[in-house]
Image (cartoon, rainbow, N blue to C red):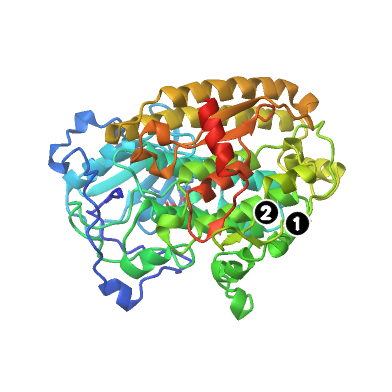
Amino acid sequence: MVDCLNCFPCFSSQKSKKSNSKREGSPAEDNFVAKPPDMKNKRPEDAAAIDPANIKAKHYTFRELATATKNFRQECLLGEGGFGRVYKGVIPATGQTVAVKQLDRNGMNGNKEFLAEVYTLSQLNHENIVNLVGYCADGDQRLLVYEFVQGTALDKRLLENKGDQPPLNWYTRMKVAASAARGLEYLHDNANPPIIFKDLKPSDILLDGDNNAKLFGFGLGQHGNDMNLAPTRVMGTYGYSAPEYVRTGQLTMKSDVYSFGVVLLELITGRQAVDTTRPNDEQNLVSWAQPIFKDPKRFPDMADPNLGKNFPEKDLNQAVAIAAMCLQEEAEARPLMSDVVTALSFLSTVPPPGAVPIPKAPSVASKKNSKGKEDYSKSESERESEGESESERGSLSGSDSSYQSESSISDHKASTKITSRKHSSRDASKKHSSRKHSTKDISNKSTKKPSLVEKGDKKSSELRKKSTKKSSKASGHKSSKKTSLKILSQKSSKKSEDESIFISRNSSSSVISADEILEHMGSREYGNISFGLISSESITSNRSED
Ligand SMILES: Nc1ncnc2c1ncn2[C@@H]1O[C@H](COP(=O)(O)OP(=O)(O)OP(=O)(O)O)[C@@H](O)[C@H]1O
């Protein structure tokens, strides 16, 4: 287990100003003193040792930020969160537009802890998080300066859409999910020490003009600078917090995976995590969804009516399956964000314009696997007998033309379909390079060597390039040539490279299929849900092929 970033201990704000007032924190929870977080990845820099000269983010004077925000004028106010107000500003010297968060002064303890957190946050840089660009620690003023994101928060776009924009289409929703997952994965796998978002919800996800998600609001919220200090209060948001966090106050990366699962479910269903306007048994989204997870025939009923059935049913089944895995009661049984990213990257790939429409795939039948667990997937032979190919993944439950029109009313213009696929490939390559980073990080803790990963990555990226060019020709065509993409297993940090799991995939596909990822997740025995498609023999034979 990793520790979390005990951020901004100097601010004991209780996030009380949050407008939706959905905070958990019953008196019982308030009194709860959680177990101390694991100390394994103790913050490398002691707060006392932070030299402002080592902080990458720029130091601004209060005067500079006051000028930038027109003296924190109301017209510049972007919003108010639990830790203070956020203003839009323009840095006079550079003309850069920024978002300035003026932290509440309640409970401020001092400068060192603030600088330590700024130091950690300023090391981060990723396209799917809102990056910190500067800070101010003048007198008793503490301000954080972020890149400004022109766009809308996901809660507003998805759940409070006033009808002035068309509803988000299926692929855009998957793109939002995949990019948010990438941001979270970055915080988990690349930040040092790993950062637990703690309280992910749609209002923490900003969508830029291309509907790329950017996470913000992390790095704030726990008391106690010393990692030995326990969080004193559960501060999650009702409907999004993992059950173990509510019970014990213990935060892990798996609590983030749970919150992400709720967000994914919101994207699929268009329902809010908590909606008191619905009948009693539908007010809590996860409680409403849990029984449906066990009955895949009902998955299509979960889809947001605003989607108008314009989604590939198979993709919907897979997206629901991913959400179900993220939402498992047992934290250990939830997948890693890196696996979620891989699966969602596939689902967010818009099929090429020439893709042949394939008749609606039959619903996935529920069955029990060998362990007597629910198995939502079809066996390989079933799939083959149904003639499924990689290209079918992109087919919609309706006709191709319905996809076209759906796409054209949406923020995806027709011409962006191919670009989007390219983007996806590019994202996937980035993903792989970031995976390399992860591997490197992991290798510090284990005997893992990166060579085979790199080999696999090279192969995959060549294949992706070929497949992008050939995508329209390749649809429906199955190559017998197999390659392998190595997915770092959850246990890989403990195992040697030879024991890592390889998953076979068709060389004509540009990315590994979500089924395969689900299978991979299932192969790791993620809790009560199994999505087995590939036999253990096929995994073994592909290991030997490589
Ligand atoms: N970098 C940014 N670019 C553009 N808008 C931003 C940026 N950061 C924050 N905002 C806007 O400011 C509002 C307030 O942000 P803040 O982080 O304080 O709120 P929050 O996430 O709603 O609260 P909290 O996470 O503390 O409960 C957000 O709803 C968002 O619309």
Disc 1 target residue: 363
Q: Kindly state the secondary structure of the residue where label 1 is placed.
A: loop
Q: Quadrant of residue 354?
A: top right
Q: Quadrant of residue 40?
A: top left
The one nearer the camera, 91 or 521, is 521
The one nearer the camera, 143 or 375, is 375
Three-letter amino acid code at disc 1? Ser
Q: Is residue 358 above or below residue 479?
A: below
Q: Is mark 1 within 8 Å of ligand 1?
A: no
Q: Kindly state the secondary structure of the residue where label 2 is placed.
A: helix
Q: Residues within 10 Å of mark 1 (few under 14, many from 20)?
A: some
Would residue 180 be seen by someone viewing this image from the given angle? Answer: no
Would residue 284 be seen by someone viewing this image from the given angle? Answer: yes
Can you give x and y, in whole percent of width and height, for residue 447 in the image?
Answer: 31, 31
Q: CA distance from mark 2 to mark 1?
A: 8 Å
Disc 2 target residue: 317
Residue at horizontal 63%, vertical 22%?
Answer: 463
